[in-house]
Amino acid sequence: MKAIYPLVLASVLCSSFALAHDAGDWFVRGGLATVIPNESSDDVVGSGELELNNDTQVGVTLTYMLSDKLGLEVLAATPFTHDVSTRDLGKVAEVSHLPPSFMAQYYFGEANSQIRPYIGAGLNYTIFFDEEGKGDLAGTDVSLDNSLGLAAQVGVDVTFAENWFANASVWYMDINTDVETAVGTIDADIDPITFMASVGYTF
């Protein structure tokens, strides 16, 4: 994420282009998204709560502007994969997921401003797959229920060329799942913060 700040600063200082966010405009953003789980769960047979590591993948968003202030956005990404561990057992599983999200957005400032901050709120549907037991759970069945929850975001677009802009955004997703394992069902909240740095194009 640190790499986006010099890009944004250079855009502000050097660019004379204005970024259009008018009714009927489409724009796509693509870049790197880092998922940082903020997990909590039931205790796993006295070994502590489930813990998930961070992962970075390619993220893409597609936005349609209903007006110069209101937009609708869809988030997609390549699959995120996390190691799942506990305090005492170490790594006990590996799981992948896709987090498609739908957001309604409000953009601040004028339609042709060089800098457009925005906020958004909507829904996230997380699809879990490729669950695999590791360590003490190796060779056993592990599965996670898919999750539907609320999502929120803040971000900013900064133009640096005609139709091109840099973007930085932060997402919060409410993800709750039941983890089915050989030792029983574990209720887990993952609730990640996602940081995304991207480049966008308006058409």
Image (cartoon, helix red, strand yellow):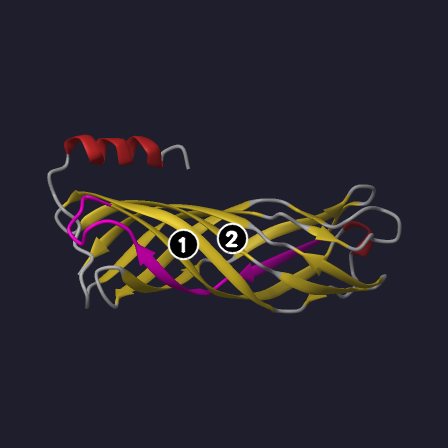
The reply to whether the C-beta atoms of the residues labelled 1 and 2 are less than 8 Å apart is: no
Residue 96 on the magenta segment = yes
Q: Which numbered marker is on residue 172?
A: 2
Region of the chain picked out in magenta, as a range: 93-115
- Direction right: furthest residue: 46
In the displayed structure, 35 sits above or below 173; it is: above
State the SS at label 2.
strand
The quadrant where residue 111 appears:
bottom left
The disc, 1 or 2, on the residue closer to the chain's N-terminal end is 1
Q: Nearer the viewer, residue 198 or 103?
A: 103
Q: Label 1 sits on what residue type?
A: Gly
Residue pointed to by mark 1: 59
Residue 23 on the magenta segment = no
Q: Label 2 sits on what residue type?
A: Tyr
Magenta: main secondary structure: strand
The quadrant where residue 70 appears:
bottom left
Residue 51 horizontal/vertical position (percent): 70, 47
Residue lying at 62% horizontally and 45% vertically, measured from the top left: 53
Q: Quadrant of the C terminus?
A: bottom left
The residues tagged by marks 1 and 2 sit, at their Cα atoms, a distance apart of 15 Å
In the displayed structure, 87 sits above or below 9; it is: below
Decide if residue 29 is on the left or right side of residue 79: left
Residue lying at 64% horizontally and 54% vertically, measured from the top left: 190
In the displayed structure, 166 sits above or below 80; it is: above
Residue lying at 61% horizontally and 51% vertically, measured from the top left: 82
Decide if residue 115 is on the left or right side of residue 185: left
Residue lying at 42% horizontally and 37% vertically, measured from the top left: 1
